[in-house]
Amino acid sequence: MSGHDWQVVSRATPEQVAFYKEHGYLKFGRIFTREELDALREHVDQMIASLPPGKRPEELDVPHFEDAWLFRYLAHPRVLDVIECFLGPDIVLWSSHFIAKPGGDGKAVPWHTDGDYWGNRLEPMEVITLWLAVDESTRENGCMRVIPGSHRWQHPGREAYRPVDTTTHVFSTELQNVDESQAVDIELAIGECSFHDAWTVHASAPNYSSKRRCGYTMRYMPAHVVHNDTSGRHRIYLLRGKDRTGGRNIYTPVPEF
């Protein structure tokens, strides 16, 4: 791929925002430069190489809590410019997660909505996930799949989930009765990204191919969303604009990066 083929965008068009609101997902282009993406992949490679015995690379949840370097991506001005197109000017980092499926035995992600897993921790449940393709993501290596329009469903809640085997799945439960014939595969080239709503039903197949499939989920919410967690175990960060909860949220200062 030549440098001329790698085009960086820093805004979503009104048509893209309308598509996202209607369908609950959006395939997007590249927000980071090739050099920025290469640096991130090298960093991820080092993270995976340093994992303790028994810890899977699909389990790199909230790595930014301990690794401030990642804020150069999570809080990058181009990212926030794009997110602002969807959420408005007051932006909070809710969470992030690397899901790296190794070639050959990468785990499946069961059908679910993020909102069901997060429960009543957020009020209202308004989160957009930027899914960044650290590696190429294809049908062969287990790309994400979504059910268009499912963010508009009235979801039955956790009682609609059934247990699944955690030796083959990233999470322990799966949403039942999903019509997979409606699924859309979100195939992405390296550096491309997609967006999905907290209520969009999505999943991904296992990775039996020879190529790793790593994605970085970067999750944001508007600053009027209340974080109902006073334990302090989960940290949120006000990245742009002002708090709109009347002081109900407690924000962790953004670290230097």
Image: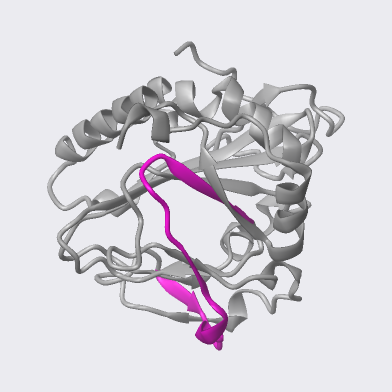
Above or below — where is 181 with respect to 193? below
Left or right of 110 on screen, residue 91: right
Identify the magenta region. Answer: 172-197
- At 25% from the left and 66% from the top, the residue drawn is 207
Quarter of the picture holding the N terminus: top left
How many labels, in total?
0
- Magenta region includes residue 34: no
**The magenta stretch spans residue 177:** yes
Question: The C terminus is located in which quarter?
Answer: top left
Q: Is residue 85 left or right of residue 128?
A: right
Q: Who's the residue at 48% across and 11% down the image? A: 256
Q: Nearer the viewer, residue 200 or 68?
A: 200
Q: Is residue 132 left or right of residue 230?
A: left
Point out the residue furthest to the right here.
246
Name of the residue lying farthest toward the top: 256
* Viewer-proximal residue among 63 and 12: 12
Question: How far from the left and from the top, in percent, is residue 211?
Answer: 19, 56
The quarter of the picture where residue 208 lies is bottom left
Q: Is residue 107 above or below residue 241?
A: below
129 in relation to 182, above or below: above
- Model colouring: one colour
Residue 47 position in % (x across, y down): 24, 34
Front-lying residue, 245 or 14: 14
Query: Residue 117, located in which quarter of the rendered image?
Result: bottom right
Tell me what residue is drawn at x 70 percent, y 66 percent: 151
Q: Residue at x 24, y 70 (%)?
A: 167
Q: Position of residue 243 (x, y in %)?
A: 79, 26
